[in-house]
Image (tube, rainbow, N blue to C red):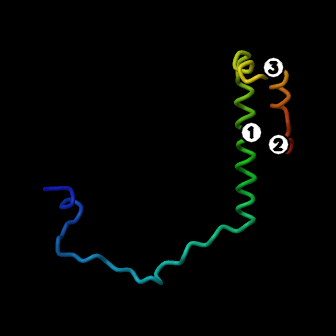
Amino acid sequence: MDTIDTICLSRGTKPVKMPLDAFEPARPISRLAHRLWAFFTLWMRKRESRWTLRDLTDDQLLDIGLTRSEAKTEVRKSFFWD
């Protein structure tokens, strides 16, 4: 018994054809929802990168060219700060 036999119980069945009007087409996301989602994902990326920066050791900060005080300044920045 091969795999197809275990999936298809009966070899004599025909595929079921659904009428094209049975399903509604997917609606596009509204612009407002898209902008809110973009804002949220930007906020999350900034938050995550600042948390990662906060947790770096002094040696790791030195590798990327930052001091501990520069990293603390960046971590304390508001979301709206670039």
- The residues tagged by marks 1 and 3 sit, at their Cα atoms, a distance apart of 20 Å
Left or right of residue 25, residue 13 in this image: left
Q: Which residue is mark 2?
A: 79
- Image quadrant where residue 29 sits: bottom right
Residue that extends furthest to the top in the rendered view of this protein: 59
Q: Which tag is nearer the camera, tag 1 or tag 3? A: 3
- The residues tagged by marks 1 and 2 sit, at their Cα atoms, a distance apart of 8 Å
Q: Secondary structure at mark 3?
A: loop
Mark 3 and 2 residues: CB-CB less than 8 Å, in contact? no
Name the residue: 21% across, 60% down: 4
Using the image, determine if residue 47 lies above or below residue 67. below
- Image quadrant where residue 52 sits: top right
Q: Which residue is mark 3?
A: 67
Amino acid type of the residue that numbered disc 3 sits on in the rendered structure: Thr
Crowding at dot 2, Cα within 10 Å, few <14 / some 14-19 / many 20+, comes out as few
Task: Judge by depth and name the residue closer to the eye, 35 or 8.
Answer: 35
Crowding at dot 1, Cα within 10 Å, few <14 / some 14-19 / many 20+, comes out as some
- Image quadrant where residue 53 sits: top right
Name the residue: 71% across, 20% down: 63
Crowding at dot 3, Cα within 10 Å, few <14 / some 14-19 / many 20+, comes out as some
Q: Secondary structure at mark 2?
A: loop
Q: Which mark is residue 47?
A: 1
N-terminal of the two: label 1 or label 2? 1
Amino acid type of the residue that numbered disc 1 sits on in the rendered structure: Arg
Could you say where residue 54 lies in the image, as x and y percent from the top left? 75, 26
N-terminal of the two: label 1 or label 3? 1
Using the image, determine if residue 66 lies above or below residue 18. above
N-terminal of the two: label 3 or label 2? 3
Could you say where residue 51 lies in the image, as x and y percent from the top left? 72, 32
Mark 1 and 2 residues: CB-CB less than 8 Å, in contact? yes
